[in-house]
Image (cartoon, rainbow, N blue to C red):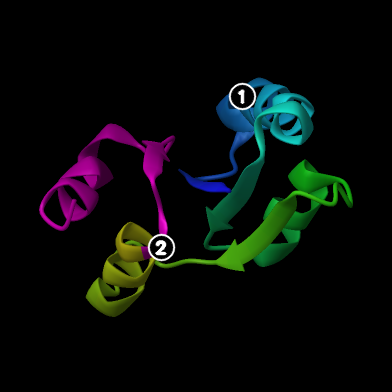
């Protein structure tokens, strides 16, 4: 199973999350949706069995390291000014 981390569950991530979850069953993916607001991440996953909502603070280096280490692929849907916090660890 491949682990995909989506960082940020804002409005612009909705279509991507939905698409990846649809593909996840056939392609054996686990989709971790990481957001500062875990409830928002849960809504985006919509109880999909291959989805997981994660509370995530991009400014907490230990959380960034944890997600980078777990993921085979990271997609940052965070605001552009926050990408650097992820890039430094990835």
For the point 31% across and 64% down, which residue is it? Answer: 69
Q: Residues within 10 Å of mark 2 (few under 14, many from 20)?
A: some
Q: Is residue 17 above or below residue 83?
A: above
For the point 38% across and 42% down, which residue is it? Answer: 74
Q: Is residue 65 above or below residue 29?
A: below
Q: Label 2's element?
A: helix
Residue 46 falls inside the magenta stretch? no
> For mark 1, what is the residue?
16
For the point 24% across and 42% down, which residue is it? Answer: 83
Residue 22 horizontal/vertical position (percent): 78, 26
Q: Which residues are magenta?
A: 70-90
Residue 71 horizontal/vertical position (percent): 40, 53
Q: Is residue 23 above or below residue 81?
A: above
> Quarter-wise, where is residue 70 in the image?
bottom left
> For mark 2, what is the residue?
70
Residue 60 as seen in the image, left or right of residue 30: left
Residue 88 falls inside the magenta stretch? yes
Q: Residues within 10 Å of mark 1 (few under 14, many from 20)?
A: some
Residue 27 as seen in the image, left or right of residue 65: right
Comes first in the chain, label 1 or label 2: 1
Task: Identify which residue, 71 or 80, lies in the foreground.
Answer: 71
Q: Are marks 1 and 2 in contact (CB under 8 Å)?
A: no
Q: Point out the residue furthest to the left here.
A: 88
For the point 62% across and 46% down, which residue is it? Answer: 31
Residue 65 as seen in the image, left or right of residue 84: right
Task: Identify which residue, 86 or 3, lies in the foreground.
Answer: 3
């Amino acid at each position: 199973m491949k682990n995909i981390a989506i960082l940020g569950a804002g409005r612009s991530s909705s279509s991507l999350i939905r698409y990846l979850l649809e593909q996840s069953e056939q392609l054996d993916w686990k989709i971790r949706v990481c957001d500062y607001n875990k409830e928002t991440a849960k809504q985006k996953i919509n109880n999909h069995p291959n989805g997981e909502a994660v509370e995530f603070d991009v400014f907490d280096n230990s959380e960034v390291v944890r997600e980078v280490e777990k993921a085979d692929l990271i997609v940052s849907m965070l605001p552009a000014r926050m990408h650097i916090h992820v890039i430094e660890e990835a």
